[in-house]
Image: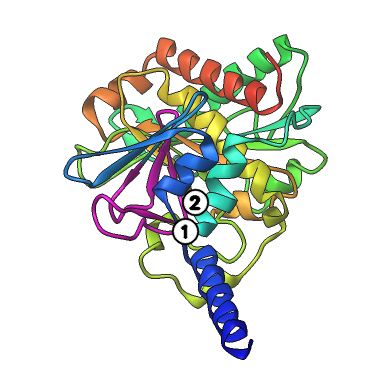
């Protein structure tokens, strides 16, 4: 009796550890009602189900859901051919995206055109980031209002608005989208990325491999963790669907404009001004209109609107 009780206790303990530690991809496939296959010598695992496709890479936190890259909070573990997903990545990242809670309110949307006035943002040749973000913001405002969605702009002209003022302007709004263009020292960097605040107790994407004590901080916007991720995913999915560029994923960063927001918020980096072809495209009205339309579709999808 005692021996069996001890055995039962040990079994419970190891089962608990397995739950806390990770979930094998076979179990992920079972939960999705799909099948698991491995490629690239076991380094890439794909779960294919009726309504979703998930791809995981060995020792990588960049997972793919239905063709969109979404950074989890931990790299996969395990040997090639036997990858293990961190439980938190399933419970707090992928499962909520697979079964979103439903339509979130879209009464009023705050559109934040990055930079402005004396803050030009990235300057590349004749292109200034502050002018491009304002142009996309004004196009987005027109598109949302055509759908009878009210909007608030953090700036409607070439004015300087302090970063800490922007979340205040979003007060009373149902979400904020901050619009930026990217820059890198290497001219080859290209693609689209969308940022949301790291979930409470987790690291920014850039520091996933070396978490620090400051990652334990929480901010007002952390009460929107679930909506933030869904919003970021909806925006990134529509932006990469424009095509012709790289999907750099839904990432996490503690940008001031995000962390002080009391409503769900995401920051989109619409492409690299420092990349020759992408910079040229961002300079065209057609491309900026396509970006505004993609953001509008992403917002509507987030809110369960057509
Ligand atoms: Zn910027």
Residue 204: within the magenta?
no
Residue 53 sits in quarter: top left
Q: Secondary structure at mark 1?
A: loop
Is most of the magenta stretch helix, strand or loop?
A: loop
Residue 240 sits in quarter: top left
Which mark, by number, is residue 298? none
Q: Is residue 94 above or below residue 244?
A: below
Question: Which residue is drawn at the image coordinates 41% and 46% (left, top)?
Answer: 26
Coordinates of residue 187 in the picture (x, y in percent): 20, 38
Total numbered labels: 2
Q: Residue beneath label 2, please?
A: 252
Residue at the extreme front of the image, as rendered: 1
Q: Does residue 113 appear in this view?
A: no
Query: Pointer 1: residues within 10 angstroms few (<14), some, or many (20+)?
Result: many
Q: Quadrant of the N terminus?
A: bottom right
Q: Residue beneath label 1, please?
A: 204
Coordinates of residue 59 in the picture (x, y in percent): 29, 56
Labels 1 and 2: the sequence-earlier one: 1
What range is drawn magenta here? 56-85
């Amino acid at each position: 009796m005692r021996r069996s009780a001890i055995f039962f206790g040990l079994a419970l303990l190891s089962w608990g550890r397995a739950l806390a530690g990770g979930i094998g991809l076979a179990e992920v496939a079972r939960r999705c009602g799909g099948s698991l296959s491995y490629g690239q010598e076991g380094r890439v695992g794909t779960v294919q189900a009726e309504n979703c496709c998930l791809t995981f890479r060995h020792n990588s936190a960049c997972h793919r859901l239905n063709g969109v890259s979404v950074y989890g909070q931990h790299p996969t573990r395990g040997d090639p051919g036997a990858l293990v997903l961190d439980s938190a990545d399933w419970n707090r990242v992928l499962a909520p995206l697979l079964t979103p809670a439903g339509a979130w309110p879209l009464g009023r949307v705050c559109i934040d055109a990055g930079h402005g006035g004396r803050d030009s943002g990235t300057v590349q040749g004749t292109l200034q980031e502050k002018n491009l973000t304002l142009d996309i913001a004004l196009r987005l405002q027109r598109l949302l209002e055509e759908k009878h969605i009210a909007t608030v702009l953090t700036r409607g002209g070439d004015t300087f608005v302090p970063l800490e003022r922007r979340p205040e302007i979003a007060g009373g709004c149902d979400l904020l989208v901050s619009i930026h263009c990217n820059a890198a020292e290497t001219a080859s960097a290209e693609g689209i990325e969308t940022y949301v605040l790291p979930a409470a107790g987790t690291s920014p994407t850039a520091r996933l491999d070396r978490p620090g004590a400051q990652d334990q901080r929480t901010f007002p916007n952390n009460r929107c963790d679930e909506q933030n991720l869904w919003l970021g995913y909806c925006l990134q999915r529509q932006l990469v669907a424009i095509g012709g560029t790289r999907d750099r994923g839904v990432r996490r960063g503690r940008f001031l404009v995000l962390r002080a927001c009391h409503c769900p918020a995401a920051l989109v980096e619409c492409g690299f001004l420092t990349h020759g072809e992408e910079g040229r495209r961002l300079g065209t009205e057609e491309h900026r209109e396509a970006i505004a339309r993609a953001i509008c579709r992403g917002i509507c999808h987030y809110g369960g609107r057509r």
